[in-house]
Image (spheres, helix red, strand yellow):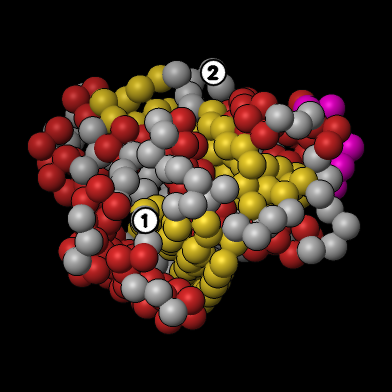
Amino acid sequence: MKIIGLGKGIPKKILSNDELSTIVDTNDEWITTRTGIKNRHVCTDESLTDLAETAAAEALKNANITADEIDMIICATIGGDYTTPSLACCVAERLGTSCAAFDINAACTGFLYALDIAEKYLTQDKSNVLIISAEVMSKRVDWQDRRTCVLFGDGAGACVATKGDSLKYLNLTVQGDSKTINSPIGTGNSPFISEQKESGFLYMDGQEVFKFAVSTAEKEVALALEALNLSTEDIDMFVLHQANKRIIDFARKRLKQPENKFPVSVDRYGNTSAASIPILLCELVEEGKIKAGDRLFMCAFGAGMTAGSCVLIWE
C-alpha cells in the first residue's frame, strides 16, 4: 500500500484562546502552558459531510484520479451528521459514486485503523481506497467545562491509498477501557427503560490519558523499531496524534530526538481526533517537509483505549 494523494477540510471559523475565554472561565496562558493550543477551528454553518467532501475532493485531485476510480470509501469518525446513514455514504452521495462505503470508530486512532483495513482490501482486487478521517468535536464537548472544551477542534483529513510497497509496519491494539474517555448516548424516549438519560458530553480523565499516551508512544516506537531492525535515528519524522503538545514533547524527550522530527499542528487546530494525523500529513506534504524516501513513524491513541502505529516510506 502507498498514499498517492492527501486533502483536508477545515471550518472557516477560528476560535482563539482569547475568544474562548469569553465563553468559559479560562485564559490564553492557562491553555497554552498546559496544551500548546492557541487556536482551533469550529463548525458554524458547515456540516461534517461538508468538511469530509472538501478533504476527499482535494485528495482525489492530488492523486490525479476521479471518484469513479475509487473502489471503496472508509470514514474514520466517532459520528457523522446522522446515526445512519454513515458519513461514508453521505460522502459517496456528494461524490456521485456507488462503491462500497462504511464508517469505522476507533476514536483518535481511526486513521491508522482505516489504513489497516485499506491495506487488506488492496491485497485483493481493489485498486484505490479513499480514507477520510473527520470529526466535529465542537458538538460533543461541554462548553462549560474548561478541562475539555479548550482541547478540541473540528476538521477532516483524507487520503487515497493504492497498491504499493510503502507500508512497512502496522500495529493496532486496544486496552478495553470505557471509563477514561467516553461520550455516552441517551435512552431516547423509550417507555421500556426505567431510568431515562439524555445524551452526555465528552468526558475525559486528563491525567490518565496523558500517562497512556506517553507510554503508548514510547512502547509503539520500540515495537516498530525492533520489528524492522531500525534505530530512532533511522526515522526521518515522527507524526504523532495531535492531542496535546506536552504529550508530544514528553515523548520526544524520552526518545532523545530533535524538535524538527516531531512536527505539530495542535497549536493551530487543537485535537481533531481521528483527523489530526491526516491533516498534519497533508500540510507537511504541501509545505515540502516530507520528501520521497523519507521514513515516517505514525502513532495515535484514543478512547477505548485504542492505540496504533505504522512505519511507511514516503513515495
Q: Residues within 10 Å of mark 1 (few under 14, many from 20)?
A: some
- Residue situated in front as seen by the camera: 142 or 243: 243
Task: Specify start and end residues of the magenta stretch as a single range.
Answer: 95-100
Residue 249 image label: none
Q: Residue at x 20, y 55 (%)?
A: 258
**Residue 49 figure quarter:** top right
- Does residue 33 appear left or right of residue 153 in this picture? left
Residue drawn where x is 32% and y is 25% of the image? 15
- The verdict on residue 244 being magenta is no
Q: Is residue 96 magenta?
A: yes
Q: Position of residue 154 (x, y in %)?
A: 46, 35
Q: Is residue 142 above or below residue 114?
A: above
* 194 versus 282 height, above or below: below
Q: Vertically, is 290 above or below 45?
A: below
* Amino acid on which the number 2 mark rests in the picture: Asp
- In x, y percent, where is residue 102? 76, 49
Q: CA distance from mark 2 to mark 1?
A: 39 Å
The N terminus, quarter of image: bottom right
Residue at the far left in the pictured view: 29
State the residue position of label 2: 45
Q: Which residue is mark 1?
A: 236
Label 2 neighbour load within 10 Å: few <14, some 14-19, many 20+: few
Point out the frontmost of discs 2 and 1: 1
Kind of residue at disc 1 = Asp
Helix, strand or loop at mark 1: loop
Magenta highlight: main SS: loop
Can residue 274 be seen here? no
Q: Position of residue 119 (x, y in %)?
A: 70, 61
Q: Is residue 133 left or right of 280 when viewed as pictured?
A: right
Q: Nearer the viewer, residue 27 or 72?
A: 72
